[in-house]
Image: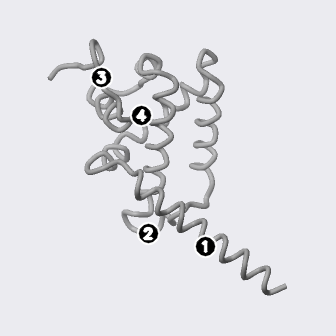
């Protein structure tokens, strides 16, 4: 009995460490993480609008739904009560999901649903790893 509980605990710890390492490896570099935190209110509104758009692929809406469930759960990879890094896992997961959603939905759909400023959209494009062209490029 104790062997099983110990094995399950060790497996959960190994999985948590693997996810934590993966988040650190794929996190946005430099100021992009800070931008993700600053843009969080607009990002939540954007994700809500994209999830409600029936013209987008089902996979996009499923990713957004899974992200919203994760953010709503009180359990995090890194507890939120830890200063600075407590919210970093949420920001990293939002950024990674956002990259996937934006690349799948397309920049035009994201631009049409973006509730924030042009500067915020520029930060979103950097966060999602998109190259912006044409009317989305904004002033230099």
Kindly check if marks 1 and 3 are in contact, taking CB atoms under 8 A apart as contact: no
Horizontal side of residue 140 vs 44, given as left or right: left
Horizontal side of residue 135 vs 81, given as left or right: left
Helix, strand or loop at label 2? It is loop
For label 4, the residue is 42
Q: CA distance from mark 2 to mark 3?
A: 36 Å
For label 3, the residue is 132
* Image quarter of the N terminus: bottom right
In front: mark 4 or mark 1?
A: 1
Sequence order check: which comes first, mark 1 or mark 3?
1
Sequence order check: which comes first, mark 4 or mark 3?
4
Kindly check if marks 4 and 1 are in contact, taking CB atoms under 8 A apart as contact: no
Q: CA distance from mark 1 to mark 2?
A: 19 Å
Helix, strand or loop at label 4? It is helix
- How crowded is the residue under tag 3: few (<14 C-alpha within 10 Å), some, or many (20+)? some
In front: mark 1 or mark 2?
A: 1
For label 2, the residue is 82
The tag on residue 13 is 1
Above or below 111: residue 76: below
* Image quarter of the C terminus: top left
Sequence order check: which comes first, mark 2 or mark 3?
2
Q: In the image, residue 16 lies at what x, y percent? A: 57, 66
């Amino acid at each position: 009995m104790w062997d099983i509980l110990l094995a399950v605990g060790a497996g959960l710890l190994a999985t948590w460490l693997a996810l934590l390492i993966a988040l650190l490896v794929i996190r946005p570099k430099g100021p992009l993480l800070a931008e993700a935190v600053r843009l969080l209110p607009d990002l939540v509104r954007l994700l809500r609008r994209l999830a409600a758009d029936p013209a987008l692929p089902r996979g996009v809406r499923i990713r957004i739904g899974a992200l919203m469930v994760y953010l709503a759960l009180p359990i995090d990879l890194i507890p939120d009560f830890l200063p600075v890094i407590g919210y970093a896992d949420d920001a990293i997961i939002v950024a990674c999901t956002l990259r996937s959603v934006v690349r799948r939905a397309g920049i035009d759909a994201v631009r049409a649903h973006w509730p924030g400023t042009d500067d915020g959209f520029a930060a979103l494009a950097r966060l999602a790893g998109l190259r912006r062209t044409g009317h989305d490029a904004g002033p230099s």
